[in-house]
Amino acid sequence: MIQAQLNREIGAFAAAMDELYGHYLDSINGFQKIHQFIVDGQKEAKRLLPPGIDLDSRELIIGCGDPADPSHFIQHRTTQGQFKNRNARGGQNCIRAAQLLIVLIYSFWETRYRSSIAAALGLKDTSALKVPLVGDLRLLRNDIVPCSGRIQKETAAKLEIMTHFKEGDEIVLKEDAVHTLVQDLKAALDSLVVHAGGVDPHHRTVWQIHGGTVRPKTEIYETDL
């Protein structure tokens, strides 16, 4: 009974992480599509315009409605160069998407799943359930929101798993590091189940924990079902 409840609760958290990771992947692929759209548009514009015009310094406006309609309003104003840079692979939007994933995974764990998993393990005190990697996410979350995404001295001293971050570092996780983070979190869940119920040779297959190659670049592809 305990094992079934534990599998159910951990399965729910694993599914939530997959949904959040999917949101991250959708986001970074969307950023790159937008980046390419601007790059292609500038190439076409340069073909038609006189030489020497700096398109990156030109204003780019995002608005709502037809600009010729009096009800139109501006939502955001930037330059074409800034827009390209932030949407490029590894740009600021990708950095923020990874930071948002950290914040969301920890928030889901702390506000919903930690207590139910602790109960399934028979723990009366939720705080007794400690997963070091999730604890590191808590520390990073605390530096992402009020500290502009930079590691503070106290955080660097307390990190247990993600010790490559040093004081003053910007919290940047590239795509392969985000993939590894999600896989390592699933491995931590796997360890909880195995520790509570014994070795389950099918468990790693169930949670799709691939301990080998990390794809450095995300591709969208279709499979025939």
Image (tube, rainbow, N blue to C red):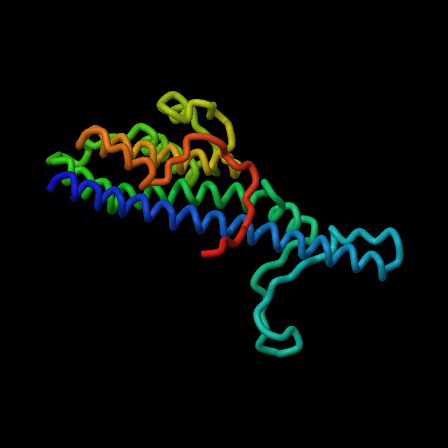
Extreme-front residue of the structure? 225
In the figure, 55 relative to 212: above or below?
Answer: below
Where residue 153 sits, quadrant-wise, is top left
Q: Is residue 100 left or right of residue 195?
A: right
- 64 or 26, nearer to the observer: 26
Where residue 203 sits, quadrant-wise, is top left
Extreme-right residue of the structure? 50
Q: Is residue 115 visible?
A: no
- Residue 132 screen position, x and y as percent: 31, 28
In the figure, 134 relative to 1: above or below?
Answer: above
Q: Quadrant of the C terminus?
A: bottom left
- Residue 216 screen position, x and y as percent: 55, 36
Q: State the residue at coordinates (35%, 23%).
A: 160
Q: Is residue 70 visible?
A: yes
Q: Quadrant of the N terminus?
A: top left
Q: State the residue at coordinates (89%, 58%).
A: 50
Q: State the residue at coordinates (55%, 50%).
A: 29
Q: Is residue 13 left or right of residue 82?
A: left
- Residue 102 screen position, x and y as percent: 40, 40
- Residue 151 screen position, x and y as percent: 45, 29
Extreme-top residue of the structure? 157
